[in-house]
Image (cartoon, rainbow, N blue to C red):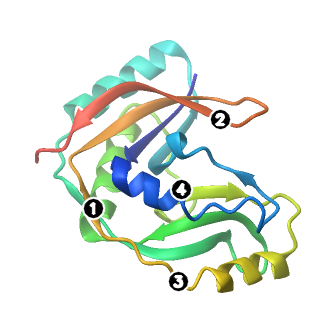
Amino acid sequence: MRLFTAIDLPDGFRNEVADLQAPSALDARWTSPDQFHVTLRFIGDTRPEQAARYEQALADMKASPVRCKPYGLDVLPSRRSPRVLVLGLERTASLVALHEAVSDALSTEGLSPEDRDYTPHVTLARLDDTAPEAVHAFLRRQNGPSFPAFNADQFVLYESTLASEGPDHVPQAIYSLDG
């Protein structure tokens, strides 16, 4: 099982984000809008018995609702070497606190700490061999669309199955954020 935790986007917000996708304007592998999410913590390949322990650790965790504030289009890992087109989110205190709570809960069951800073985002496309200049031109044409902030009162443990047409994310458990 390949697992991760994430916040789902509200439906109206999901539709607005999907409007940013312009397959004719940029050579990329576009993410299906029904797969949009904000990853909290990638877990990776996991045996079923370990997955059950992670699921219980997350169920025992206490956390408050979070505020997600998009700041606009961006690329990862950098402008010089863009490989992923994203809608970036600010590192709000509540979002970072949830990321840390999820990470701590999973580490109690043996998951190693991440070796990079948390960068909240929604993946719009994978850029593969797209020239950086084409990506930069696409970003300039978008005129900095703005999106409203949204609140999340739950998060999801997903199983991700990789396929040639893109990953398929299936919910395994849903957790309320009620403090």
- Outermost residue to the left: 179
Q: Name the residue: 46% across, 47% down.
A: 41
* Separation (CA) of disc 3 from disc 4: 15 Å
Of circles 4 and 2, the one toward us is 4
**Left/right of residue 139 with respect to residue 65 in the rendered view:** right
Distance between the Cα atoms at labels 3 and 2?
Answer: 28 Å
At label 2, the amino acid type is Pro
Residue 18, numbered circle: 4
Q: Secondary structure at mark 1?
A: strand
Residue 167, label in figure: 2
- Circle nearer the N terminus (4, 1): 4
Question: On the image, numbered disc 3 is attached to which residue?
Answer: 144
Q: Is residue 30 above or below residue 89?
A: above
Tell which circle, 3 or 2, labels the residue nearer the N-terminal end: 3
Q: Which residue is mark 1?
A: 150
Residue 99 image point, x, y percent: 36, 54
